[in-house]
Image: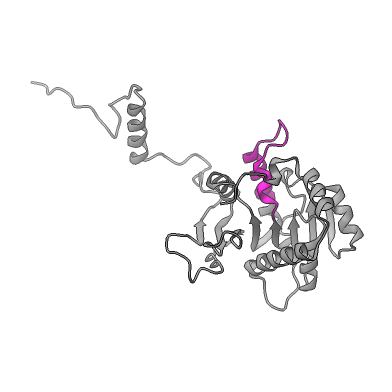
C-alpha cells in the first residue's frame, strides 16, 4: 500500500497541488509515457467493443494526457477537472475532447445514460480528504458515485487507477460505490512489485461481470491477492417495500453478546432467548 509520507493530497487542495506539480515538473516525455500506459490499461479494463468508437468520461482529466490516448484510439470524450489552470493547459494543448470545470465530490452534471464508460487516473483518492470544514468524505464519495452511476449506460464500466493510502481508505471507497449501486472490485497489477504495482477499481453499472485478472499475477505469491471483488445493488439495504430488512436471530444474538462484553444490561426475554419460567403446580 502506498505510504502516506508526502502524499500530494495531504499538501493542499487538488486544484492547487496539480498546478504546483505541473509547473515544477512540466510535462516530460516520461510523464506522458506513464500516463499513457495507465490510460491504456484503464481502457483495456473497460472491455469496450472492438473497432467501435465510444463516448467516454475522463474524471480528473488535468491537462488532457489521458484524453490524448482516448483520441488516438478513436473514442470521443469529455474531461472533468477541478483546476481551471489545468483545463487551460489542456486548451493550450488543443485536446480533442470537451472540457468541464467541476468538483467530482459535488457530482457529475450529465444526463442519465450519457457515457459508454469512464476512466480516471490518480484522482479518486482525493475525495477521501476533507479540504474544507464542510467536506464529508463519505458523502462526497457517495454523491460522486451515485451521479456517475446515473450518467453511465447500463452495462458500462468505470475504471479508476488510484493510489490508496491504506486498507481503510479502500474500504471507504468501495463501500460508497456499492451503496451507489455499483458492483465490481479491485484489480491489482504486479502485486509483488513495489514500483510497478498499480491499483485499479473496476466498477460495473447495472450488470455484474467477472472481475478481470491483474497483470503479472502468474508468478505472484499465493498470499498476495490480485483481485478483491464485491457486489452491490441499490436495494441492498432495503426490501421491496422500502423498509429496513428484518434483523435475524444471529444479528440479535451477536448484539446481545457485544453488549455483555461492554458490561451493559442485556434483556434475556426475547423471541430468540426466552428466559426459563418456574413451572406451575
- Residue 209 quadrant: bottom right
Q: Residue at x 73, y 61 (%)?
A: 115
The answer to whether residue 123 is magenta is yes
Q: Is residue 243 left or right of residue 4?
A: left
Q: Position of residue 276 (x, y in %)?
A: 19, 27
Please identify the quadrant where the C terminus is shown. Answer: top left
- Residue 190 quadrant: bottom right
Residue ranking furthest to the bottom: 51
Q: Position of residue 162 (x, y in %)?
A: 64, 54
Dominant SS in magenta: helix
Q: Position of residue 58 (x, y in %)?
A: 75, 58
Tally of numbered discs: 0
Q: Residue at x 75, y 40 (%)?
A: 12
| Residue 156 is at least partly visible in this image | yes
Of 175 and 14, nearer the camera is: 14
Q: Residue at x 48, y 70 (%)?
A: 219
Q: Position of residue 174 (x, y in %)?
A: 57, 50
The answer to whether residue 227 is magenta is no
Colour scheme of the picture: one colour
| Residue 143 is at least partly visible in this image | no
Of 225 and 73, nearer the camera is: 225
Magenta stretch, residue numbers: 122-147
Q: Is residue 239 left or right of residue 61?
A: left
Q: Residue at x 73, y 47 (%)?
A: 104
Of 132 and 275, nearer the camera is: 132
Q: From the viewer's perspective, is residue 249 above or below residue 2?
A: above
Amino acid at each position: 500500500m502506498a505510504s502516506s509520507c508526502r502524499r500530494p493530497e495531504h499538501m493542499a487542495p487538488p486544484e492547487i497541488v496539480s498546478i504546483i506539480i505541473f509547473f515544477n515538473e512540466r510535462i516530460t516525455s516520461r510523464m506522458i509515457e506513464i500516463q499513457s500506459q495507465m490510460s491504456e490499461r484503464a481502457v483495456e479494463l473497460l472491455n469496450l467493443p472492438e473497432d467501435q468508437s465510444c463516448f467516454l468520461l475522463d474524471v480528473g482529466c488535468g491537462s488532457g494526457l489521458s484524453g490524448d490516448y482516448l483520441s488516438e484510439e478513436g473514442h470521443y470524450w469529455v474531461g472533468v477537472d477541478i483546476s481551471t489552470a489545468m483545463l487551460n493547459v489542456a486548451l493550450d494543448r488543443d485536446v480533442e475532447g470537451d472540457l468541464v470545470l467541476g468538483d467530482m465530490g459535488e457530482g457529475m452534471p450529465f444526463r442519465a445514460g450519457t457515457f459508454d464508460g469512464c476512466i480516471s487516473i490518480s484522482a479518486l483518492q482525493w475525495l477521501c480528504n476533507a479540504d474544507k470544514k464542510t467536506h464529508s468524505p463519505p458523502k462526497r464519495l457517495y454523491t460522486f458515485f451515485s451521479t456517475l452511476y446515473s450518467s453511465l449506460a447500463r452495462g458500462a464500466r468505470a475504471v479508476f487507477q488510484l493510489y490508496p493510502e491504506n486498507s481503510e481508505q479502500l474500504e471507504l471507497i468501495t463501500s460508497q460505490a456499492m451503496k451507489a449501486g455499483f458492483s465490481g472490485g479491485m484489480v491489482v497489477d504486479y502485486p509483488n512489485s513495489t514500483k510497478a504495482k498499480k491499483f485499479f477499481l473496476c466498477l460495473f453499472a447495472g450488470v455484474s461481470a467477472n472481475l478481470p485478472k491483474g497483470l503479472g499475477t502468474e508468478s505472484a505469491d499465493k498470499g498476495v491477492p490480485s483481485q478483491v471483488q464485491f457486489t452491490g445493488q441499490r436495494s441492498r439495504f432495503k426490501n421491496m417495500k422500502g423498509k429496513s430488512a428484518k434483523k435475524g436471530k444471529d444479528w440479535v444474538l451477536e448484539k446481545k453478546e457485544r453488549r455483555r462484553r461492554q458490561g451493559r444490561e442485556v434483556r434475556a426475554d426475547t423471541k430468540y432467548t426466552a428466559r426459563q419460567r418456574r413451572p406451575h403446580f
